[in-house]
Image (spheres, coloured by chain):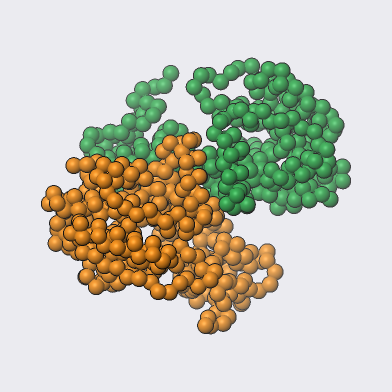
Chain colours: A orange, B green
């Protein structure tokens, strides 16, 4: 068995994925990574090592006209050759102006993948993320400015929906780098499309891939592995911290979401206070999107009395008010 | 008052440093950063804003012959001009082969600074670390491969010795970047030596300073500030985590340093187990130097029984043994 395929099945075993009788969705863009994943699973299928039903799911984001159509037909052809079922969908909307293109495309993709899983009664969606994707995402977030949350790596396996659980599995994330994929592609003459989406979508990601990582490799030849490992480690520590913080919140009876008593907040260490405030804002607001560390810092200064005024405005029509010895969360206007 | 000097005194107030009557050691290499710090304090002294006794301490590492001597005389001259006392010492040993030069020099420097503080009965040693130093160190450790510990930033104020406390203060760390220093130097015609030590000592640091940071600045013009803030934030979260972990260790009665019961370890989450093992090895070994995450992982595998064998060798003549349902720490040979 080839190195690449052997590593894939080893990871399959480690993750306790089913070896037979299940329907499994493969997200395939037509790029090198996802074509390699599909091909390796085809080899394992042929060798009777794994006998599931694989369904190739391809979303046509419809951002590059004929080229997008060509990607879709290419992926369909590949699926036929591998004897995998093929499902596709074409998006007819465009992202609204000012929206992050990469984020919009990702959202659409996961909606489609989840719908496909539902349609086939599948519990597993597999994407072909590699060590390089992990390292690039880490660097993107680092350069933009992130706390532990943002520096936490993607997970090998996560849940996409809680009822009728659907798992998002990244079976190449912990071991495959770009060279592994390129070698596998070459050895087996696997055809694939150039992932132009990757080339154009975000200038920062392209700069990181084409310039920054090659530069860092000159200092540490194992930089991709190193950064991927760091991001996993940060993710693990961050989760542990969240879990211990929640214990503390319960213990100190700071778990009434509707308000926080200033007196109790005053006795917390700075780091602990920041964490408690973040967690409380998250619960009340539903998300921390657009809430920066500067917002949390302002709330902390409101608590300590080092900031004048009685409230801190948060993005999205909400604010935190200091009143009668308490912090309160208020919606200032209903979003249209 | 100039911007630079005003920011320095604002930080001075924030850190609650003494404004008069104290002896304060200034570590001055003769480079731009430390000459700026000394000059700004001289201005504040002249304006009667701060009236302490400042003592310039300069260590001659004696690594560059005549140039090292010139640095020392330059710094002495500067001290005379500023009317600050001057203390110097010349190192006559060389780092043994294979030792990290930067580390050796740092060790010698802090020995000298601490001795100087002792001699003058001073409680404060000031070094001129900037946001750039913080960002560079973060990147060094990131590229080398580090956990939260290694990614934690330098502190603005730390204790160098516990009895007869001596504080190490970095009064420029949170606000001064290279441009601030350069501007201040130009405006005031402050003379300084080129920090050749910085130019040559470690090729990675030089690469980071001269190539990596300029490259990253093209993606995020505030990259130095961003990375410095991230490292401070990681440090704070790491400390919080350590503190909560120690609480857990006490609660679960895992605080007998001589052994760890396997049964209790088995019930810990992976991240928690790693942290407990690290902390236990640290207590027994006195340091985590040369102990990598791979060592800790091996011990974790020993705990779970996924690793065959009964012990894990650690660098520096020590090992962890699994015996009678316990983990034990053993010294295998006394280091000469």
Residue A86 visible within the image: yes
Q: Residue at horizontal 64%, vertical 28%?
A: B197
Q: Residue at horizontal 39%, vertical 55%?
A: A195
Q: Residue furthest left?
A: A48
Residue B264 visible within the image: no
Q: Residue at horizontal 43%, vertical 18%?
A: B336
Q: Is residue B307 above or below residue A153?
A: above
Give residue A290's position: percent from left, percent from top. 54, 67
Give residue A45's position: percent from left, percent from top. 16, 53
Q: Is residue B180 above or below residue A127?
A: above
Give residue A200's position: percent from left, percent from top. 47, 57
Query: Toward the viewer: B64 or B75?
Result: B64
- Side (left or right) of A119 relative to A317: left
How many numbered marks does the figure carry? Answer: 0
- Side (left or right) of A49 relative to A198: left
Q: Quadrant of residue B293?
A: top left
Give residue A109's position: percent from left, percent from top. 37, 66
Q: Quadrant of residue B93?
A: top right
Q: Residue at horizontal 17%, vertical 62%?
A: A53
Q: Residue furthest front?
A: A66
- Side (left or right) of B265 relative to B81: left
């Amino acid at each position: 068995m080839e190195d690449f395929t052997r590593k894939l099945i080893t990871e399959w075993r480690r993750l306790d994925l089913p070896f037979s009788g299940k329907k499994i969705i493969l997200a395939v863009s037509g790029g090198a990574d996802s074509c390699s994943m599909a091909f390796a699973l085809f080899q394992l299928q042929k060798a009777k090592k794994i006998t599931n039903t694989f369904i190739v799911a391809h979303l046509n984001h419809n951002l590059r006209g004929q080229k997008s159509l060509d990607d879709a037909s290419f992926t369909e052809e590949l699926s036929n050759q591998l004897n995998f079922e093929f499902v596709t969908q074409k998006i007819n909307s465009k992202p609204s102006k000012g929206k992050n293109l990469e984020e919009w495309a990702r959202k659409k993709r996961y909606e489609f993948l989840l719908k496909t899983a539902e349609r086939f009664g599948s519990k597993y969606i597999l994407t072909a993320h590699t060590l390089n994707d992990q390292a690039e995402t880490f660097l993107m977030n680092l350069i933009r400015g992130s706390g532990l949350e943002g520096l936490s790596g993607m997970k090998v396996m996560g849940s996409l929906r809680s009822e009728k659980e659907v798992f998002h599995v990244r079976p190449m994330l912990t071991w495959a780098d770009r060279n592994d994929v390129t070698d596998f592609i070459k050895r087996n003459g696997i055809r694939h499309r150039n992932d132009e989406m990757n080339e154009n979508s975000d200038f920062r990601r392209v700069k990181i891939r084409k310039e920054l990582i090659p530069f860092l490799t000159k200092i540490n030849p194992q930089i991709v592995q190193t950064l991927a490992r760091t991001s996993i480690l940060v993710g693990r520590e961050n989760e542990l911290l969240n879990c211990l913080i929640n214990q503390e919140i319960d213990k100190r009876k700071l778990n009434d979401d509707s308000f926080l008593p200033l007196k109790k907040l005053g006795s917390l260490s700075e780091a602990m206070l920041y964490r408690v405030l973040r967690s409380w804002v998250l619960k009340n607001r539903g998300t921390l999107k657009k809430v920066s560390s500067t917002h949390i810092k302002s709330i902390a200064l409101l608590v300590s009395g080092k900031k004048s005024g009685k409230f801190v405005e948060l993005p999205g029509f909400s604010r935190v008010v200091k009143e009668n010895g308490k912090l309160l969360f208020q919606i200032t206007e209903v979003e249209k």
